[in-house]
Amino acid sequence: MMDMQIEISIGKIRKEFPVELARVESVEAAEVLRVKYLGRKAGLVTNLMGELGGLSVEERKKWGPASNDLKRFIENALAEKERALESQSFEKDLARERADVTAPPLPPSPVGHRHPESMVREDLEDLFASMGFLVLDGPEIESDYYNFEAVNIPADHPARDMQDTFYLSAKDGSASGGKGSNRWLMRTHTSSVQVRAMKIHGAPLRAIVPGRVFRNEATDARHEHTFSQLEGVVIDRNITIAHLKGVIETVARHLYGGKTEVRLRPKFYPFVEPGVNGEVSCFLCSGKGCRVCKGAGWLEVFGAGMVHPNVLRAGSVDPKKYQGFAFGFGLTRLVMLKYGIEDVRLLQGGDMRFLSQF
Amino acid sequence: MRLSFQWLKTYVKLPPSVTPEKVAEILKLSTVEVEGAEHQGEALENIVIGRVLKAEKHSNADKLLVCAVDTGKEMLQIVCGGTNVRAGMLVAVAKIGASVRWHGEGEFVEMKLVSLRGVESRGMICASNEVGLADMFPSKNEREIMDVSHLSGVRPGTPLAEALGLDDVIFDIDNKSLTNRPDLWGHYGMAREVAALFRRPLAAYKTSPIRLGKERRLKVDIARAEDCSRYMAVAVEGVTTTPSPSWMQKRLLSAGVRPINTIVDIANYVMLDIGEPMHAFDAVRLSEKNGTIAIEVRRAKNGEAFHALDGRRYDLNGDDIVIVSGGRVLALAGVMGGQEGSVSPSTTSIVFEAANFHPSFVRRTSTRLGLRTESSARFEKSLDPNLCESALRKAVELTLELCPGARVASAIADKKHFRLNQGPIRIPVSEMTRKIGVEIPYKEINRILTDLGFSVKKTGEMLAIGVPTWRAMKDISIPEDIVEEVARIYGYHHIPAQLPVFPIVPPAHRSGRLEQRITDALVRGLGYTEVQTYSFVSPVQVRHLGEKEDAYLELENPLSKDRPFLRRNLVGNLLECLAKNRDFSDELRLLEIGKVYRKEEKGEEMGGKNGGVLPRQDTWITAVCMRRGNDSMLEMAKRALVTALGPPAGEAGAAVCEYRVRVVAKPLPWQHPGKTGEIVVGGQVVGFLSEAHPKVSRAFDISGRVGVLELNMSALASLAAEALVFYKPVSVFPAVSRDIAILADQGVLHANFFDAIAGSDPLIHKVELFDVYQDDTMEAGKRSLAYRLTLQSKDHTLTAEEADAAVRKVLEILKKRFNATPRA
């Protein structure tokens, strides 16, 4: 009797469950169905399996596996149904979800900007560092000694006329009241760091010094009393003019592209002998002549030359053993050329309308 | 300096293939800066000689004339306003298509057919300044046209350039490129360069000895030997001061010097020829006793007046050298002649001076008086004293040639004391290669140096090089100078570029990297914008910051009185920037990297014989922020600090250095007295975290609070080592978190609580402040802080009891140490 009932129950469930499952359209309905059949307390399959306990061993052997099969069948079918429903509902949701990937993050936050000169300076520092140069710094208030005397510009040298110098007031007595080589001034060029570098690091030496320099001249769109230079110095036993040309060419090509040409022309600077001007073919017109190079085809960029033996001696480097070259250029001018900035005063004007363009 | 191509060619023959442009190009590459090569005739195209046949009043304009002008092929009707136009006159006619400069001003414009008050004008009768010939034809007033009637043999229609012989090419040499080359201040010196560069022979500079006269004696006294290394003079009688011949005038004009009269022109001509400035005195105006003319070279007395040839009076002092005769100052040595004693139209006897004055004195005098002349420009470059002799001879030779009645009336006075260092300079041939980097054969070295006037003697490898007098003053004195001569004439453009070979040694110092990292973090992470501002600040700024001017270093010669002080911080300028940009946005975040100058602290050594140190000049990064209507700007500054340096000591994560923030005992006047902290690394203060004092912000015209972060990068760089992070194995046992809120006196700082909690029990893994709260329900002076504690064990799963016990322990400690009570 029992036997029969169980058979009927199994048959009924097998027949009815799929019909009910087909009607399920939500995860919740699937859960109701699961409770109806597999619920721990009153599930149809659970009850059925409970009844197996009252059967004989033989009957249990017969119906045990059959009801287990039934349970697994229902479990699997429900799981499959749930997966299908879940994926359906995802699709429904995702069909509604649309975000604007082009919009900026909200709420808005300030966007920062590097100063254009810093970007150019750091790019050059990276270039020189990659070639094994030290990147050095030096004082901006400098002694007359390091700014002039040590770089072979003695008192009364005409070269001092070329640079109008800011001097510090002597009112501070012993502090800045020094005379002669002790006099304090705003350095007129980064060359003032040459001898300092030699004294500290000795020879051989490879170093650059980017930094601020000062000239006492009236400001206008093209003149500034405060601007930046980058000085370089290379000293070793057999450094030549050809090497000077090679390094300048490397820098010029880094700045203006691989086809840039460099030419050297004689130019007098007291701290070098021979002294040259390093000119680069104009990046805009490639040497044909244009507005940027004022028709010349060449841009004067570098002042350079072989370090004067007096300068080496001032740095305690023996000119009989060592020689080398130094070069310098106006970082500020480079920045202006690069970004097409026509008024130098913008660089230190602190105007967000200018700065926020970089 | 203007250099005539034709004048050059009198000393060095150049084949036709060597164009002026080629000469300019090669000079540029090897010698001097040539700013341009101007073909004289070029600007005068379509300008021809015309003869005015008729000049009648314009029916419709008082000041205009309608002229009929014969220009050879055609007769032109031209309306002209010139006051001196008359029939029969030869004039310069700018035909349609010519370029002229209206009234001598502005750019050149092209002539077009025009109608003036109803009368057609087919060209223009030119004034000299309208065609760039003002020097050659000075006009008395601006309505005067150029009268060329003296060219009577010239047919109308002849191009003006041809009629005037303007067929030269003028090089414009940048004087600044000549500062170190005293030998290049005349045509002969430049010809020497051209000869060496084009490998052409240089004609010798020939002068004949002077036949001496006996009528007069010259007595020269030089008060201070160092002022004047040589003084030569000679008297010449029977000279005329008529205009000099046209060839000489043409030469002078081509070099930009206006002709005056024969004698003055001769002196100028010699200067332009070999670079030695000369002066001619009217002998009658010199003091003469018993046939002896006395000339004295001495320093001016303080306050001594000098009336110069430019018509102005100069007050002299003891640094000026003057030429004196009979107690009267006749010339400012090497700079300018005086009104007294100079050649006048009535002069018949003269004394020529060819001297050599100390370059520094000439330079100082001309700079101080703002009197820069052709003469001073040359003397300040250290001229060769031997030039005096050639110059004097040349001047006398020309005088005798151009003034038929002239004769030398005295012996030559010649006071001299100079020594030239002519070497020899010794340098091995191989040294040239070692310095230049390319091997130049000895033959070429020898050729170059010989062409430039050096003597070369070779013994084995060693060269002994004799320096010519015109390079021996100070221009050439060491082997490197010889290297330059060889390299530049050989041509820098022939030296191949080569990269040096270096051992791979990683460079050690790069403090800038840290500045870059921190700045990038603040710019990209928090939206700060980097500015650069001047090192110089104003008294107003100093006052607004509440500081004292005495503390600031000051410029002796500031460009403007507005900004004489050197900044002691970057804050002042940044506050000015905030104010300047306040209309740009409601929220501003600015930073600067720069040096500040502190005289009370010791900086780098000064070098030189006397030693000493400079004021300290550290590099700081300062960041300021403000947001309209927001008072908690200190929080923003704190965020900047964590972004810049990473988490402070005690908190997990790698930082730039192990830093702490502590309360500042005595804030600066511009810092908020209750909202200022200092950033400390290993006991050393490396920066500040603050809000600007509201009074100060207001003084700078900023509405709202300003947060400030200051980092001393120079100090940080020396403490550079990053804070060491030791990895702690991750516990596999679950962590438990508990929140506590405590009520405590406002004076007890987070740092106190943090350290106490973190050190209370080994189970405390992490301490995090998540809220600070204060309201009216609390006792005055109290505040509440809420912490989240994370507890975890290395070796077992914590029970709730263990966690609670640890929290109780924390609360007990806080109660005991800080009288802090738990808050429900």
Image (tube, rainbow, N blue to C red):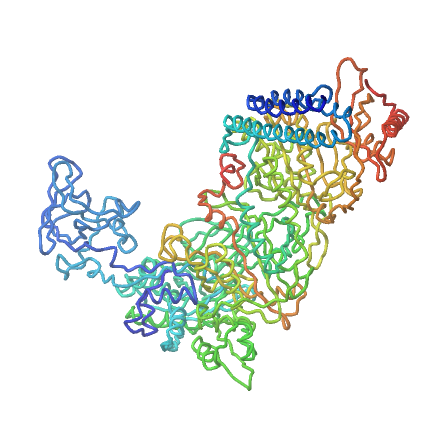
Relative to the observer, which residue lies in front, B338 or A291? A291
Q: Does residue B776 lie above or below B738 as drawn?
A: above
In this picture, residue A261 sits left or right of residue B539: left
Residue B432 position, x and y percent, is 53, 75
Image point (17%, 51%), residue name: B93
Relative to the observer, which residue lies in front, B4 or B779? B779
Residue B170 position, x and y percent, is 32, 61
Residue A186 position, x and y percent, is 61, 48
Q: Residue furthest front?
A: A1
Q: Residue furthest bottom?
A: B460
Query: Which corner quadrant holds the N terminus of chain B?
Result: bottom left
Relative to the observer, which residue lies in front, B251 or B766? B766
Image point (16%, 50%), residue name: B95
Q: Does residue B56 lie above or below B426 as drawn?
A: above
Q: Does residue B85 lie above or below A258 as drawn?
A: above
In this picture, residue B107 sits left or right of residue B486: left
Query: Which corner quadrant holds the C terminus of chain B?
Result: top right
Residue A137 position, x and y percent, is 64, 52
Residue B416 visible in the displayed image: no
Relative to the observer, which residue lies in front, A82 or B354? A82
Number of numbered markers: 0
Residue A306 visible in the displayed image: yes
